[in-house]
Structure formats: structure tokens, C-alpha cells
Image (spheres, grey):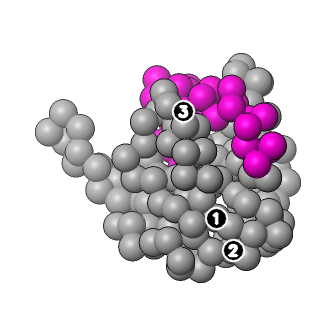
Amino acid sequence: MITLKPGDKAPEFTGKNQDGKEISLKDYSGKKLVLYFYPKDNTGGCTAEACNLRDAYGDFSGNGYAIVGVSPDSEKSHTGFIGKYSLPFPLIADADHSIAALYGVWGEKKMYGRSYMGIIRTTFVIDEKGLIENVIEKVDTSNHAAQILKQA
């Protein structure tokens, strides 16, 4: 499970975004990054979270933050999700769960008495030097931007 904490070096990752372009943590060197992990495109909580971040995007960029979302969905799914909701930030397709595993957010979940493996919704705020500033495990999908920005 999640063992990363504020002050830790963020694990280096590389993944493909909705356009098939590789994105790495090093691309954000010298910038602040909101790296958020979510379970699935076009589901209630995930849509609320993405749209809440979209609506506050100006506040994030005005404070020097970039935003990147990560889920196990395909590049094609991400393209549709971004288009449908006009998301101004990239989404990484993590189909093999390698990035989620690096960050400790791929694990056992329970729903309706059934156990399964999946993304544990978590957000990491990473500073300009690649150090984790904040880890948000109890994500309020409808007010996530405020959760992040109040600690900025």
C-alpha cells in the first residue's frame, strides 16, 4: 500500500498520454506537479474529480502547478474522456499498473463484499525538486482542487 510520504523523492515514471506521447516525471523538473491516480474514466467519482480539477485549472497554473492524471484506462479511453469533459491536462494510460505500483496505489479493494485489485484513489503533490510535498489519500472528488490548493 501507500508508503510514500512528504519529503520522499517521487519515483521516476514514464508512461504514454492520450496521444501516445511519453510523459515522465523529469518533464516536470523545476515545476510543481499534481499527480493524481484514479480508477476509471467516465465513472461518477472520477468524472467529478477530473471536472473539479478542470474548473480550478487556472488556479493551479497561476500557482505554478501542472496536473497529470493516471488510470489503467487505454489511450483511446483517455482521448474520449478528455474530449467529452474538455480536460486541459494530460492523462497517462497505465494499463500494466506499473506507475500505480511505483507509487503504492495499486492494491486490494473491496466493494459489495467482493475483493479485487485496483487503483486506490490518491493524489501526490510533487515540488520543483521532485520531492513529495503532500499525499492526499482521502480524496473528496467534488472538492479535490480545494483540498490541494489549501495546502499550496
Q: Residue at x 48, y 27 (%)?
A: 142
Is 7 part of what is drawn in magenta? no
Up/down of 87 relative to 1, above or below = above
Image x and y of residue 134, in percent: 52, 62
Gap in Å between the C-alphas at discs 3 and 1? 19 Å
Q: Nearer the viewer, residue 135 or 82?
A: 135
Q: Residues within 10 Å of mark 3 (few under 14, many from 20)?
A: many
Give the foreground label among 3 and 1.
Answer: 1
- The amino acid on which the numbered mark 3 sits, given as a three-letter code, is Glu
Residues at circles 1 and 2 in contact by the CB criterion of under 8 Å: yes
Is 43 part of what is drawn in magenta? yes
According to the image, label 2 marks what residue?
A: 130
According to the image, label 3 marks what residue?
A: 49
Up/down of 60 relative to 129, above or below = above
Q: Residues within 10 Å of mark 1 (few under 14, many from 20)?
A: many
Q: Is residue 55 left or right of residue 83?
A: left
Image x and y of residue 118, in percent: 39, 51
Along the polypeptide, which appears first: circle 2 or circle 3? 3
Query: Which disc number belongs to residue 115?
Result: none
Gap in Å between the C-alphas at discs 1 and 2? 6 Å
